[in-house]
Image: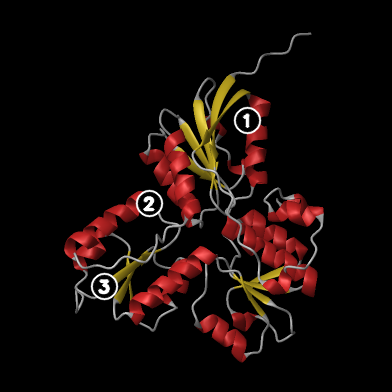
Amino acid sequence: MSMTAKPPLTIRLCEPRGFCAGVDRAIQIVVLALKRFGAPVYVRHEIVHNKYVVEGLRGMGAVFVRELDAIPDDGQPVVFSAHGVPKSVPAEAARREMLYLDATCPLVSKVHKQAMRHMRLGRQVLLIGHRGHPEVVGTMGQLPEGAVVLIETEEDVAAFDPPNPAALGFVTQTTLSVDDTAGILAALQLKFPLLHAPSSESICYATTNRQDAVKAAAPGTSLFLIVGAPNSSNSKRLVEVAERAGATKAVLVQGIQEMPWELVAAGATIALSAGASAPEILTDAILEGLRVRFDLSIELVQTAIENENFPVMRSLRDVPLEAADMAFVNGEGTAARAVAG
């Protein structure tokens, strides 16, 4: 009996994609805290912007809260998310004598230090970023009220009239599009030639690497799939980068359940990447779904090799993790498979 041949499909698979070192560390902190202290472990806001990760951790005993006032005084720890928090949050936790674990990405912490350095040197701080994003709220909350001016667009640059144009310093949200930031920064430098840059690049290496891979894979593709959450800034930027770099259409999907199958044409070339908070198990499921329907030809588009590793805090380093826990931390998802939905 002859089987009907599956139609061909070429897929360009981006590398690097998915989890970055900061996300990996944040998830590991929650899993290790659950092992050391038992459930519940409270987490202020989503630890990272990914529903699959959040539901997986919830299934292990994590309790997600918006603010500290939702946490009872039961002696259990609270973890601050990878996006960072205003200084008022750890201050409140200390006042309540709560055990808190700060999972802020070290690269976000670096931006906090850069902003504080600008202020210490007498400069007004400009933050290039998106209003309301947790990282922006956290960075602005490092300095006194009114000390940071948020710049979202080139129009904001045009409208900005500082009291001392010679005493300005900028930092940026780590997850922005490199290209968009370049336009805003050029407008700022044109208007304020004495603008002081941070001591090192604010946009994180993982954001840049994922955008570079997407740029390399996008030309000539009819569809570019980005795996990520709708509230993930770096994932949404990848969609914009893909379309700007030549993909006919780019779509953000949370997982295989959101696959736009009607846009996947036989014989076409499509591309696939994932935001920094999207676990590899979600990308694997999409690849498997494509493999069932098509005769896949996979081309790896690799633009960088990432070997960064951000260690967890000393108090958690000796906690042993089982294989299933490590799989989840690494984005392979074994421990969360049952609650993936």
Which of labels 3 and 1 is toward the front? 3
Left or right: where does residue 4 sit relative to residue 159? Answer: right
Q: Position of residue 281 (x, y in %)?
A: 67, 45
Mark seen at residue 178:
2
Q: How is the image coloured?
A: secondary structure
Label 3: which secondary element: strand
Task: Give, as a three-letter code, the residue at label 1.
Answer: Leu
Q: Quadrant of the N terminus?
A: top right
Please tell me which residue is depicted at 43% across the width and 50% down the height of the picture: 237
Task: Give, as a three-letter code, the residue at label 2.
Answer: Val
Q: Position of residue 322 (x, y in %)?
A: 82, 57
**Residue topped by disc 1:** 290
Left or right: where does residue 242 sit relative to residue 123? Answer: right
Which of labels 2 and 1 is toward the front? 2
Residue 227 seen in render? yes
Marks 3 & 2, CB-CB < 8 Å contact: no
Q: CA distance from mark 2 to mark 1?
A: 31 Å
Earlier in the chain: of badge 3 and badge 2, it is: 3
Q: How many numbered marks have been drawn onto this rendered protein structure?
A: 3
Marks 2 & 1, CB-CB < 8 Å contact: no
Q: Determine crowd level at label 2: few under 14, some 14-19, many 20+ residues with C-alpha closer than 10 A.
A: some
Label 2: which secondary element: helix
**Residue topped by disc 3:** 168
Q: Determine crowd level at label 3: few under 14, some 14-19, many 20+ residues with C-alpha closer than 10 A.
A: many
Q: Position of residue 17 (x, y in %)?
A: 55, 45
Q: CA distance from mark 3 to mark 2?
A: 21 Å
Residue 134 seen in render? no
Q: CA distance from mark 3 to mark 1?
A: 51 Å
Label 1: which secondary element: helix
